Amino acid sequence: MFRLAFLGIGIGAALGFYARLAGIEGQIGFYYSEKLLAREQIDGFWEQASDDAKREIRDLALFQESKGKVLKNEDLNRETKVKLVETAGSMNLVMPGRLCAGTFVTDSDSKGCVVSKKTADTLFGSVEALGEQLTLGKGTYIVRGIVETQGQLCMIQGEKGRAYSCIRIEAPGIPLSVVRQRLTGILQEGKGWVSECDLYLGIGRIFLYLPLWVMLFLALSRMGKLLPEMFRFVTPIVGFGGVCALLLLSLHFSDDYVPSAWSDFSFWTALIDEKKQAFFSLLNHPLYDADSRMLGSLAGILAAAVFLCLIVLKSGSLVVFKKSGCEIEENLQTRTP
């Protein structure tokens, strides 16, 4: 009974983390140490882009974070220091899945802001702060939305002419190389670091199927022992079919990960080196919210998958142990005069 409960918890956790990771499918982040991007570049892209480019690139958002900004509620004489996120474009790309009340602020709303629940509670004594006014520097903003995130946070749409260091792109099903090609002139090649959500989603899918690989191995082991010798040829056939099925289900990556020839070992070496460097570059810089969500969900999938593998292995060991015990007891009974 307890084993079934733990199994259900593990499956629920793995699927929950995977759904959380799949929520940012198709998103790519390009980050730079300098403020190299401008809103006008994004406007120019949408004006000049072909129909194919507009169909492939669903959305774009520039953003810039700065800490220690003072946000005030002058009516209650309260203030707090916040992390200020200035955006140009969709705030949902910057803070995916975090909105818990109200709406995000659009490009046309220069007086709206979005704050975290903690900031709302600090400045108003309640998270029910939609429509309330706040002061940031010399500007006055109206709370349009509340986000569920740790710490003190305020998000606004940046002023015209503002430069940004980060861009997030939504392009579901489009390889990274194609996105770079479409955004030539906006992206700064050879600079910064990249967050490729579809890569981590593909790795997460592999982790998600780890328990099924263990179950397949245990099933084949038992099948080889239980089947009569004349039918044991079925075991490799079932094993081959199971392996093919699991590979088809678990391996989903973009065309960037498919070589022209599978024997091209230099392709695999270069690809592994490139993605390893990208991963460590991401870890060596401050993680933005979407990247924390991505890596945290991936770690959650791995932990849940390992937990499920241990349960499956333990259950399989118990079955084998019980079967062996029954055989020993039966042999003893037959030998007893």
Image (cartoon, grey):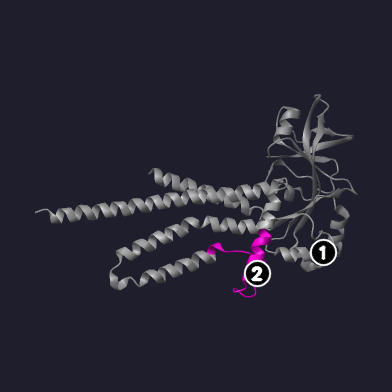
Residue found at the far top of this picture: 77
Label 1 vs label 2, nearer the camera = 2
Residue 309 placement, left or right of 206? left
Q: Please indicate whether residue 303 sits to the left or right of residue 241 in the image.
A: right
Rounded to the nearest angstrom, the CA distance separating label 1 from label 2 is 24 Å
Q: Is residue 288 above or below residue 220?
A: above
Image mark for residue 267: 2
For the C terminus, the image quarter is bottom left
Image-quadrant location for residue 30 = bottom right
Q: Residues within 10 Å of mark 2 (few under 14, many from 20)?
A: some
Give SS at disc 2. helix
> Looking at the rendered structure, which numbered label has been put on residue 184?
1
Q: Looking at the figure, which quarter contains the N terminus?
A: top left
For residue 257, above or below residue 94: below
Q: Position of residue 90 (x, y in %)?
A: 77, 50
Q: Which amino acid type is marked by label 1?
A: Thr
Amino acid residing under circle 2: Phe
Q: Measuring from the top left, give residue 234's x and y in whole percent.
A: 36, 71
User: In the picture provided, is 53 more to the left or to the right than 310?
Assistant: right
Q: Which one is nearer the viewer's eye here, 286 or 105?
A: 286
Measured from the top left, where is residue 128 in percent x and y?
A: 71, 33
- Residue 124 lies, with reference to residue 55, above or below; the image says above
* Residue 229 coordinates in the image, percent (x, y): 29, 70
**Residue 257 occupies quadrant:** bottom right
State the SS at label 1.
loop
Residue drawn where x is 46% and y is 58% of the image:
212
